[in-house]
Amino acid sequence: MKKKLFAVVMASMMAVSALAACTDKNGTDTTAGTAAAPDTTNAEGEAVYSQEAILDMKMFAAMAGTEINSGNKIQELIAEKTGVRLKETWLTGQQAGEAIGAIIASGELPDLIDGGDGSVTLWENDLLVAWDPYLDMYPNLKEMYTDEEWDKFRMEDGHIYWANVFGNHYKGIDTSTGHNGEAFWIQVRVLEDAGYPQVQTLDEYFELLDNYVEKYKTMPDGETPLIAYTALTDGWKYFCLENPPMFLDGYPNDGCCIVNVDDPANPVVVDYNTTDTAKKYFQKLNEEWKKGSINPDFATQSYDDYISMLSTGRVLGLCDQYWDFAYSLMGPFAQNLDSLDGGRLDELGCDYVPLGLTIEAGMENQWHSYGDELNQSSGVAVTTSCPDPNLAFKFLSDVLEQDVHDLRFWGIEGEDYLVGDDGLYYRTEEMRQLWKDDDYKANHICSYSYCPQWLGISRDGKNAMMPSEQTSEFYAGLAEPLAKCFQAYGAATYADMIGSPDCGQYPWYPLWSWSNNLSNDTDGGIAWQKMGEVKHEWLPKIVMSNNFESDWNSYLAAYAECKPEDFLAEAQAEVDARLATARENGYEG
């Protein structure tokens, strides 16, 4: 990989500089003004800023998202506490790599950025500020990871340029109630109608969906046709279509391959794309396609169209990661609809629960991963266009202060949550519904969702960092059909619905944190890119094929031309290297 060194110029941290890449209070570019300079330093040498002036900064996240309105109440409160008002923008009709390429070409970088799978490209172009000196300056940031974990973020030049902000439980105490990862999801009304059966295999899953569509055919309006199942192929999100064979064979989400541990001392990389299970899975999708059970637009639908379709409640099943779709449905599912005689989609039973399916009954699944996953392939970064990197890092630290963190995720005490005599936070039903309302989100809520954050127990030792992990709030927030489903299966959490055993995490896991950053500088990297291109082209064709056997063989031939063996060899070398490092540090596996 091309190595480009970026030296942090310490003098520029404190300098007064033009705000070429920042914005004024109206969100427009400014060419005049000064970056906030620290008034003094404290005993630990940390910069101390006056809160009299608020600096506007921009952040771009290479993910789909929704912008909040100017004057957002909680955003203004956070600005008063931190001295920074952050204008967030999101992907609109582009893939992450395309968007990052366009930003680089324009030369107009935001102050902060999460480049997703374009993060390495930003680094290669010398556009990111190294975190290293700031980690010692701001303990809140350093606390996010151990020294060993931070080292995994280091690029080839030895420096850290971003931090992933998701999946970290404070002090390592896991309070998870959800399943944020991938699964086959099904609406609870389908399970209730079938008497809450045990669903273990792909065949059983589709039988349930097909039977429900045959029985009811439409939504309660009598006009909107039900869709048994949909897939997503838009951009990198085509993992929803292509990687289930890995899970169906009972393996965890290493993302790019299976790592077989029949001999734990000598793990072996296996290509899930060419297994017998892969063929059975795509053949099943092809059968369902021919029945008319799969969304006819799945192969051409954009992500926004996909979310819009799910928001109607008409789609009974899908395979996806929870964070990628469910948060967008909370508002639409909680609205009173004329088509439901003033009822709501969640009250109809349109909420989804995950199922840990396997290709054969009786197999253990590993859809749910217990503990925190370290994804060092991307994260929030400060760009070289930021006129005051020190203030940017200070802001990233400040949003981890407990009072600011509470504002981001709990809201304002007395308005968004109350405190009981026992010191525990709770919400009324009216408050819960407001936090699902799109207008309220735009005007009131400011989570800065791609900035550093914690899961787990807050610093008071009582409350959860996130309301979704506060046990009382989790159960109180469940619509009745969803609560009935949990009760019927004896599930306390979404993870219980999947039923994955806690197999621990191997030292190489998750391997996608390596493959996400592959470049074209190696034979394996070239093969990896070509493999993705062939799967993007062929897998939808296979699902829609009139001659599955013929098209499956044509796909395998095209796939073989990519030289996947080159990629698998590099994946094996990475597994071996991570295992060797872990053994040097005392791992006994």
Image (cartoon, rainbow, N blue to C red):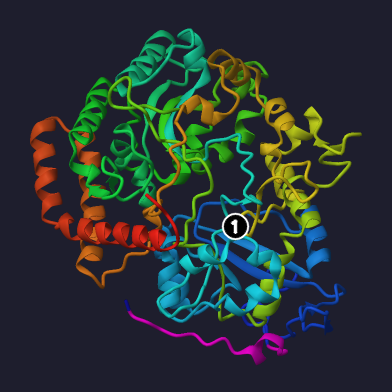
Q: Where is residue 73 in the image (x, y as percent from the top left)?
A: 80, 53
Res 248 quadrant in image: top left
Position of residue 84 relative to residue 223, above or below, is: below
* Residue at image mark 1: 450
The residue shown at (35%, 30%) is 295
Q: Main secondary structure of the magenta part?
A: loop
Res 380 quadrant in image: bottom right
Position of residue 80 relative to residue 167, above or below, is: below
Position of residue 137 relative to residue 450, above or below, is: below
Count numbered badges in the picture: 1
Residue 488 vs residue 539: left or right?
right
**Residue type, numbered disc 1:** Tyr
Does the image show residue 530? no
Front residue (pair 310, 63): 63
Front residue (pair 152, 261): 261
Residue 414 vs residue 257: left or right?
right
Please check the rendered image and state whether residue 13 is part of the magenta-colored stretch, yes or no.
Answer: yes
Q: Where is residue 90 in the image (x, y as percent from the top left)?
A: 55, 58
Magenta residue span: 2-17
The residue shown at (33%, 33%) is 250
Q: Position of residue 226 (x, y in %)?
A: 43, 21
The residue shown at (53%, 44%) is 371
Query: Which quadrant is home to the N terminus?
Result: bottom left
Disc 1 on helix, strand or loop?
Answer: loop
Residue 88 vs residue 500: left or right?
right
Q: Where is residue 496 in the image (x, y as percent from the top left)?
A: 53, 26
Few, some or many residues within 10 Å of mark 1 (<14, 14–19, 20+): some
Please check the rendered image and state whether residue 109 is part of the magenta-colored stretch, yes or no.
Answer: no
Does the image show residue 480? yes
